[in-house]
Image: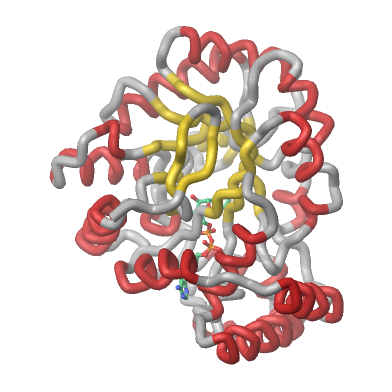
C-alpha cells in the first residue's frame, strides 16, 4: 500500500507521518514495547513511513525512543531506505534530570553521532534543531548542520519551534528543508505569526506536530479523570482544571461536525491540517494499530469550501483556553 506524498527537499515523503514520542514517554500508556513494535511494523506495512522521533524522547533517559526504532527495524527486517527517518537534537537532559537547550557546533556534531548510534544507522533523513539555543547564534548551529550534511550524516535540515525571523536567518546559511511546529484545530498561530508565509516563500516544508492537540481534539481525553498520574498533560495549561472544560466545548462542536460527515474527530483534525496547504505533512502520534489505521483513513476525508468555512467559524467562536506549554517551556518556543 502506498500513501500520497508531499515534498521535503527533493524527496516525495508519504503523509501522514507517525509521531513516535508517546511510545516512550509523555502520555499515559507509554512503554508497552510489544504494542509499540506492532504499531511501528504495521505503519511500515501500510506505507506510513515518515517517522518522527528525537533524542530526548524517553521516560527515564535520552535515546529510548530512537533505540526503539532501531530495535523494530532490526527485528522486523525493515530496510533502512523504506523509512524517511526524522530526529532532533538540542534538548539535552543532564544526569540530574534537568534539561538545557544546546546548539553549539561541537554539541550538534556529538548529538548527531549519538543519535546515529541509537538509531543503528549511518544517516538521518531529516535532522532538526528541536529548540533554538538563545546563547548560540543560529548561523553557527546551521553551519555545523551544513557540515553534517556534507559529511553525509544527515540528508535534510530542519528547525522546530523557531520564529519566522530565525528561520530566515537560518536559510541565509543553509537550505532549511522543513520546519516542525505545533499546528492543529487547537493551535493555529503559524497562520498568523509569519511561519506559514516564511515557509511558502523559502520553500520549506511544514511538518505539523500534535495535529490532534495531544489527544484533546481526537477526544481521547474526555475528562481530566482520563489522565493518569504519569501523564505529562497534567502540566499543560490547555488541560488545566480551569481551561479544560472550555476547550472541551470546542472539541464537542468539532465532534458534531465530524459525526455529521460520518468521520471521526481524529480524521477530521488530520484531514483539516492537510487541507490548509499542500506543503504540510502532519505527524499524528499513536501507540495503537487501530488508531493508526483510523488516522490513515483521514486521507479519504475531503472538505467542500462550505465545510471549511464552517470549521473556521467554529474556531473563531471558541477561543482556545490556556497556552500550549507551561510558562517555563513557552519561553523556549518561537525563538
Ligand atoms: N517538535 C516538537 O517540539 C514536538 C512536540 C510534541 C510532539 N512532537 C512530535 O509530534 C508527534 C505527534 O504529537 P503528539 O503525540 O504530541 O500529539 P497528537 O498527535 O496530537 O496526539 C497524540 C495523542 O492522541 C491519541 N490519539 C492518536 N490517534 C487517535 C485517534 N484516532 N483517536 C483518539 N485518540 C488518538 C494518542 O493516544 P494513543 O497513543 O493511545 O493512540 C495520543 O495520546 C509526536 O509523537 C512527536 O513525534 C514534536
Which quarter of the figure has residue 189? bottom right
x, y (%) of residue 95? 46, 36
Which quarter of the figure has residue 250? bottom right
- Of residues 114 and 205, the one nearer the viewer is 205
Residue 327 relative to residue 100: left or right: right
Residue 27 relative to residue 44: left or right: right
Figure label count: 0
Q: Quadrant of the C terminus?
A: top right
Q: Is residue 84 above or below residue 285?
A: above
Q: Residue at x 37, y 57 (%)?
A: 23
x, y (%) of residue 85? 40, 37
Q: Is residue 281 above or below residue 268?
A: above
Q: Residue at x 53, y 9 (%)?
A: 147
- Of residues 307 and 251, the one nearer the viewer is 307
Q: Quadrant of the N terminus?
A: bottom left
x, y (%) of residue 193? 85, 47
Q: Can I make out residue 233 in this image? A: no
Residue 4 relative to residue 38: left or right: right
Q: Residue at x 63, y 11 (%)?
A: 143
Which quarter of the figure has residue 185? bottom right
Q: Can I make out residue 159 in this image? A: yes
Q: How is the image coloured?
A: secondary structure
x, y (%) of residue 76? 15, 46
Q: Residue at x 57, y 66 (%)?
A: 271
- Of residues 209 and 3, the one nearer the viewer is 3
Amino acid at each position: 500500500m502506498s500513501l500520497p506524498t508531499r515534498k521535503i527537499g527533493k524527496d516525495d515523503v508519504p503523509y501522514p507521518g507517525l509521531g513516535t514520542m508517546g511510545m516512550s514517554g509523555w502520555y499515559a500508556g507509554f512503554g508497552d514495547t510489544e504494542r509499540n513494535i506492532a504499531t511501528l511494523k504495521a505503519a511500515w506495512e501500510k506505507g506510513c513511513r515518515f517517522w518522527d522521533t528525537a533524542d530526548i524522547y524517553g521516560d527515564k533517559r535520552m535515546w529510548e525512543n530512537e533505540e526503539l526504532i532501531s530495535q523494530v527495524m532490526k527485528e522486523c527486517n525493515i530496510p533502512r531506505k523504506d523509512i524517511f527517518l526524522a530526529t532532533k537534537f538540542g534538548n539535552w537532559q543532564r544526569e540530574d534530570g534537568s534539561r538545557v537547550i544546546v546548539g553549539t557546533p561541537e554539541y550538534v556534531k556529538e548529538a548527531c553521532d549519538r543519535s546515529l548510534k541509537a538509531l543503528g544507522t549511518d544517516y538521518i533523513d531529516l535532522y532538526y534543531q528541536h529548540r533554538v539555543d538563545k546563547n548560540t547564534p543560529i548561523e553557527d548551529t546551521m553551519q555545523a548542520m551544513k557540515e553534517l550534511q556534507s559529511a553525509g550524516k544527515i540528508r535534510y535540515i530542519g528547525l522546530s519551534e523557531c520564529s519566522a525571523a530565525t528561520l530566515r536567518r537560518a536559510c541565509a546559511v543553509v537550505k532549511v528543508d522543513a520546519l516542525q511546529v505545533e499546528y492543529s484545530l487547537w493551535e493555529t498561530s503559524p497562520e498568523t505569526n509569519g511561519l506559514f508565509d516564511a515557509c511558502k516563500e523559502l520553500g520549506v516544508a511544514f511538518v505539523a506536530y500534535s495535529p490532534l492537540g495531544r489527544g484533546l481534539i481526537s477526544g481521547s481525553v474526555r475528562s481530566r479523570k482520563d489522565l493518569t498520574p504519569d501523564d505529562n498533560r497534567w502540566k499543560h495549561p490547555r488541560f488545566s482544571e480551569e481551561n479544560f472544560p472550555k476547550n472541551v466545548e470546542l472539541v464537542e462542536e468539532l465532534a458534531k461536525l465530524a459525526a455529521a460527515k460520518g468521520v471521526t474527530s481524529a480524521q477530521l483534525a488530520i484531514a483539516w491540517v492537510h487541507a490548509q496547504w499542500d506543503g504540510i505533512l502532519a505527524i499524528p502520534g499513536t501507540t495503537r494499530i487501530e488508531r493508526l489505521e483510523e488516522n490513515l483513513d483521514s486521507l479519504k476525508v475531503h472538505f467542500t469550501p462550505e465545510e471549511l468555512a464552517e470549521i473556521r467559524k467554529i474556531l473563531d467562536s471558541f477561543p482556545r483556553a490556556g497556552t500550549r506549554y507551561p510558562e517555563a517551556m513557552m519561553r523556549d518556543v518561537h525563538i
